[in-house]
Amino acid sequence: WTKKPNFTELRGHTKEQCCQPLLCTADVCKGSDVKVKNGTGILGSTAEECCEPAYCRDVECPSMTEYTRLIHNDDGTARRGSTAKDCCKEAKCADLDCGASPRGVWKNSSRQGLGSTYPECCDKSYCADFTCQPSTQWVSRNL
């Protein structure tokens, strides 16, 4: 609660007559691991009254294929944070094995940058890139 405007001129003797409720604001919840509690009109002025933990499970990364959302810490506990910096890890093309693509339609590329999908990070494999030589040494005897 805080004093109403014109407090010294108001008549009254109760909290409701002389004071006005102090409502939680986003300014109270500074820091990347807390957020304002859900709801409107919550009374309070301290982090304990107004804030609750922020978790990475609620954060959207800038790109679904260029970043991986980090939901858990290494020890398995829920990761706290409210920003992409806290909760998202870059997915680098260099970490993708293009040769492991289904049916071998992709091959490794020299592409650098972010991505986690074959079209973003790999080159298509064409028969023109394949060499049929040397041919087999097996010869049919039924000539």
Image (cartoon, rainbow, N blue to C red):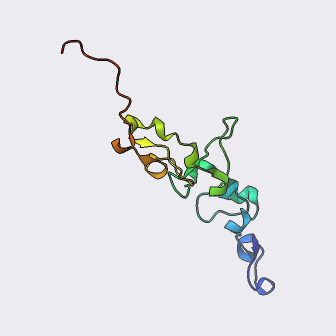
Q: Quadrant of residue 13?
A: bottom right
Outermost residue toward the right in this view: 8
In the picture, the quarter occupied by the C terminus is top left
Can residue 99 be seen here? yes
Q: Position of residue 16 (x, y in %)?
A: 71, 72
67 lies left or right of 132 = right
Residue situated furthest left in the rendering: 143
Residue 25 shows in the view: no
Quick check: 43 left or right of 134?
right
Residue drawn 65% across the image and 62% down it? 42
Q: Nearer the viewer, residue 66 or 8?
A: 66
Q: Quadrant of residue 79?
A: top right
Viewer-proximal residue, 3 or 48?
48
Where residue 118 sits in the image (x, y, percent)?
45, 46
- Across and down, in percent, residue 39 comes to 58, 60
Residue at image location 58% in from the left, 43% down from the top? 95
Q: Residue at x 59, y 57 (%)?
A: 38
Question: Considering only vertical position in the picture, is 16 above or below 11?
Answer: above
Extreme-top residue of the structure = 141
Taking depth in this image into account, of 103 and 34 the one nearest to the observer is 103
Report the quarter where the N terminus lies.
Answer: bottom right
Residue 89 in percent (x, y) is at: 62, 50
